[in-house]
Image (spheres, helix red, strand yellow):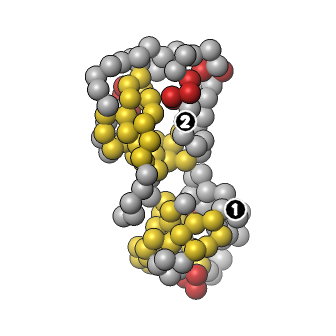
Amino acid sequence: MSEASTQITLIGIKLATIGMEFTFNGPTPDCDTCKLRNTCMNLEPARRYRVLGTRGELIHECPIHEAGVRAVEVTESPIIAALDARKAFPGSKIVFDPVRCDQSDCRMFEICHPVGMKDGERLTIVDVVGESPEDCAHGYSLKLVELKR
């Protein structure tokens, strides 16, 4: 796995466990008047994060999380995606161009179109993880890769 930068943020007590992964969905209207808003909303919406550790025992009240929130250290989770095998080389810098497919019921769809990835985003292929777990219905030759921003 690649080295990643870490951030301190606040998340719900029930999510604040080392190793827990979550997708940050952004603020809700209830967050608008919260005094801790800037600390909670410091992550990028639609990206997956992993909790690396907790910071202190202090629990803050929250209008969203009934048990409150606490400070945690997070890092962006590794991005595993299926890419065209001809472009899958460790260390390569790429512009994300997902496989053109509109079959959202395909079992490979989520790995070909990972949550939080935007068409045209610049990324680095950290490693080629392996072969695609299934054949592509469109006949693409795919490899699983780990990507970083």
Residue 57 pos. (x, y %): 28, 22
Q: Using a 10 Å C-alpha cutoff, classify the residue at mark 1 as few (fewer than 14 neighbours), some (14 to 19) or many (20 or more).
A: few
- State left or right for residue 147 relative to residue 58: right
| Residue appearing at x 51%, y 29% in the figure | 40
| The C terminus sits in image quarter | bottom right
Residue at the bottom extreme, as displayed: 86
Report the amino acid beneath label 2: Asn
Disc 1 is placed on an element classified as: loop
Circle 1/circle 2 CB separation < 8 Å: no
Disc nearer the start of the sequence (1/2) = 2
Q: Which residue is mark 1?
A: 119
**Residue at 59 percent of width and 51 percent of height:** 116
Q: Can residue 133 be spotted in the picture?
A: no
Q: Kindly indicate the quadrant of the structure image that contains residue 20.
A: top left
User: Is there any visible trace of residue 67 in the rendered image?
Assistant: yes
The image quarter containing residue 70 is top left
Question: Are there few (<14), some (14-19), or many (20+) residues within 10 Å of tag 2?
Answer: some
- Determine whether 124 is above or below 33 in the image: below
The amino acid on which the numbered mark 1 sits, given as a three-letter code, is Asp
| Cα separation between marks 1 and 2 | 23 Å
Relative to residue 18, is residue 33 drawn left or right? right
In the figure, 144 relative to 48: above or below?
below
Please state the horizontal and vertical placement of residue 145, each as a whole percent of the image: 48, 71
Disc 2 on helix, strand or loop? loop
Give the vertical position of 144 relative to 118 (above or below).
below
Q: Residue at x 44, y 42 (%)?
A: 7
In-front residue for pair 104/72 = 72
Q: Residue tagged by mark 2? A: 42
